[in-house]
Amino acid sequence: MNSIEFQKNLVFWSIFKKVEKIYNETDTTNMKTKKGFTQNSEIISKNLIKIILDECKLDYSEAGSQQSKDFRIKIGNDITLYLEIKKTDTNRIFFNDTMPDKNIYYIILFTGNKKNKKTCIGVNGFEFIKNDLWVYEYQKKIDELKREYQDTTKFPRHNMFVYPRPTYSSDITFLLQKQSVKEVKAKINKQRTYKPRKNSLQ
């Protein structure tokens, strides 16, 4: 890990710990998607992150509507931490047309379901694709297709326009399993360090 990655990791995990604490203490019922309307729950999720970023006095900007990288956080000279917030009620998250990679960090706000309780997960984007590197070839072909059909001499425009757009998504079961193991270990360690009070009558 080089110095730039080290700085990004340091800031990201500092933000994540604060988000995790607040998220675990918050009633997330109103964050669940209702009747297919995702916008309200997404606004609530992003507002939670904004509160943390403001408290940390970080210099950041937000992405515009339908743009990738929800937050761009300046952490030094020419160093920007790209942060995406993903709220989900299921074991799947969507990245739309932005392929996750090592330059993007994610905070996943999982609201819980019958199998898994609610939890907050921090992860670097490369974790999603490291076992599915074929996505690079897929993205390459999509880019080639875009360029090909932008050639108006080959495909003259009359009425129709096209624009190939990929949709990336990931099953997060592997992250939920890791989180579950992490919580069990933390609980065991807490029990090991617990020292019962001595009875004053003894």
Image (spheres, helix red, strand yellow):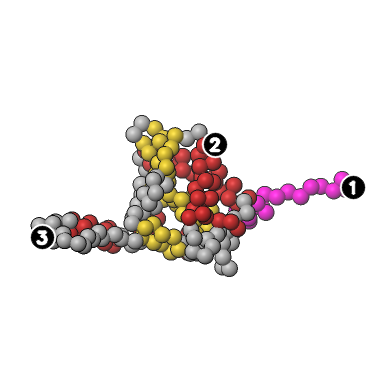
Q: Residue furthest right?
A: 201
The answer to the question of whether label 3 and label 1 lie on touching residues, with beta carbons closer than 8 A, is no
Residue linked to disc 1: 201
Instruction: Name the mark nearer the viewer: 2 or 3.
Output: 3
Residue 3: x percent and y percent? 37, 37
The three-letter code of the residue at mark 1 reads Leu
Residue 127 in the image: state x and y as whole percent. 40, 55
Give the mark nearest the N terminus, 2 or 3: 2
Of pointers 3 and 1, the one earlier in the residue sequence: 3
Alpha carbons under labels 2 and 3: distance apart: 54 Å
Question: Magenta part of the protein: which range?
Answer: 184-202
Q: Please say whether residue 161 is one of the residues in the magenta stretch.
A: no
For marks 3 and 1, give the one nearer the viewer. Answer: 3
Is residue 191 covered in magenta? yes
Number of the label disc, if any, that sits on residue 55: 2
Q: How many marks?
A: 3
Residue 93 lies, with reference to residue 59, above or below; the image says: below
Q: Secondary structure at mark 3?
A: loop
Q: Is residue 15 left or right of residue 196?
A: left
Inspect the image, locate mark 2, and give the three-letter code of the amino acid beneath it.
Answer: Glu
Identify the mark nearer the N-term, 2 or 1.
2
| Quadrant of the image occupied by residue 156 | bottom left
Q: Which mark is residue 154?
A: 3
Q: Is residue 58 above or below residue 117?
A: above
